[in-house]
Amino acid sequence: MRVYAVDAHAARLKLRPGMPLADARAKITTLDVVEADEPADAKLLHAIADWCERFTPLVAIDAPHGLLLDVTGAAHLFGGEAQMLDHIRDALKKLGFAVCGAIAGSAAAARALAHYADGTIASPHREAETIAPLPIFALNLDYSIIHGLRRAGLKTIGQVASRKRSELASRFGKEMVYLLDHALGQSEKPISPRRPLPDFTAEHRFAEPIATADVITMSLSSLAKNLSALLEKHGEGARRIEATFFRADGAVHRIAIETGRPVRDPTIIEKLFRERLDSLNDPLDPGFGFDLIRLCAEKSERTNPQTIGFDANDNKDKETGFLIDRLSARFGSHRVMRFVPQDTHIPEAAAIAAPAQQTPKQKWPARPEHEPPRRPLRLFAKPEPIEAMAEVPDGPPLRFRWRRALHSVARAEGPERIAMEWWRMREHTPTRDYFRVEDHEGRRFWLYRDGLFDRETKEPRWFVHGLFA
């Protein structure tokens, strides 16, 4: 067992992460040991990363307990790089964390400076000079590589950088050379942010945290107008919009809405968020207040102008889509479904239930005018067996019993022969002959014979698959 982390008092007593626990207990007999919980640490690190998104949306995890923030073009919003770094460090310290940080032109240089020169801000294009005095441990290399460098008498990054790259590559590998060049600012390696960068963003920072529902609603309304203006300027419409609420105590709440078609009307965006907020099982708790609210269009699409006629039915699809969006915002998109057609001739697989906000890839086939429907209005999930009587060769039965009731066939149409998809079936499935029949009382059924008609063999089974209106 090894030491995973130490507090400030243990560090002053010369205990360090990685040392055997037995050695630590030999040095400090009254050592207080707590079992490490790496999943809980990772969860906490992700929570801190959420908090850091108030400074930049490009936040990456630097395991096991580090964060990388791409603050390009964002430092001026906080008074400059020095003020921004001090603000982040002071705020995290107030939340009870021990934190160190640095700013550099490369992620590797910033990581090295944060661990061995806390608070340093490297000048642009001078990362090599800034990190040269740091020990080689700052490069976060494998222990075997560090051991080899120390045996060669190379103890600082500057000493390692002075050696030929071919010599280092042949001894320690190309990956070590690439990491060294990246730390020196001689190669590019962008960070991998936890969350994709949104297409459009509008945010509102408050001098004092807000906690009342009216002010929060007014802020969302204002942000919806700002986001709508950005979308309209670029000719885009949002399909997914997320509102992020940053609490003063570090907690972050996210609420997202989705739409079936691109929208940029601020009134619609505001109404959908109201529906979403009203439907939350756990109401939005402002705590000590929100100091930042951000509205992001995470998914957007190009919108084309549409001509609206004087016919009252022109807006029917638009109103139906808005109703679907409102229901999805309140109950969840996975609970508002509609049937969409599938590319198959098997009746029970001809349609599936899909989220209503998704645009179907296929359209339902149009039925010719004055022609009766070929498929019943009500299709059973599982065909129900019937007892056929006086079966006509290659035709429907003259009488059949279904659910203990006897029906006499007055009219019939068919057969419509449907063969099963043998390339998807593991076992052989008989061909079906479907008939539309009507009894003497006017009830219409959709029957099928499971297998072809053959008097010499066993008679096939009959089923009722649906009912016509």
Image (cartoon, rainbow, N blue to C red):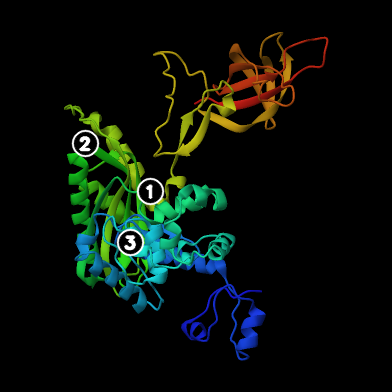
- Residue on which disc 2 sits: 235
Secondary structure state at the residue bearing disc 2: loop
Residue 159 seen by the camera: yes
Q: In this view, does 185 lie above or below 291?
A: above
Q: In this view, does 171 lie above or below 114?
A: above
How far apart in space, not on screen, are marks 1 and 3 (Cα)?
15 Å
Q: Disc 2 residue type?
A: Gly
Q: Disc 3 residue type?
A: Glu
Q: Disc 1 residue type?
A: Ser
Give whichever of discs 1 and 3 has the lower sequence position.
3
* Image-quadrant location for residue 421: top right
- Residue on which disc 3 sits: 129
Q: Is residue 262 above or below residue 442?
A: below
Label 1, residues with CA under 10 Å away: few <14, some 14-19, many ≥20: few
Image coordinates of residue 217 in percent, x first then y, are 23, 61
Contact flag, marks 2 and 1 (Cβ < 8 Å): no
Question: 291 or 443: nearer the eye?
Answer: 291
Label 3, residues with CA under 10 Å away: few <14, some 14-19, many ≥20: few
Question: 93 or 218: nearer the eye?
Answer: 93
Secondary structure state at the residue bearing disc 1: loop
Q: Residue 187: which numbered mark, if any?
A: 1
How far apart in space, not on screen, are marks 2 and 3 (Cα)?
47 Å
Image coordinates of residue 172 in percent, x first then y, are 55, 53
Callout in the foreground (1, 3): 3
Give whichever of discs 2 and 3 has the lower sequence position.
3
Question: 206 or 368: nearer the eye?
Answer: 206
Give whichever of discs 2 and 1 has the lower sequence position.
1
- Quarter in which the N terminus is drawn: bottom right
Residue 287 seen by the camera: no
Q: At 38% across and 49% down in the image, what residue appears?
A: 190
Image coordinates of residue 260 in percent, x first then y, are 35, 39
Q: At 45% across and 55% down in the image, what residue appears?
A: 163
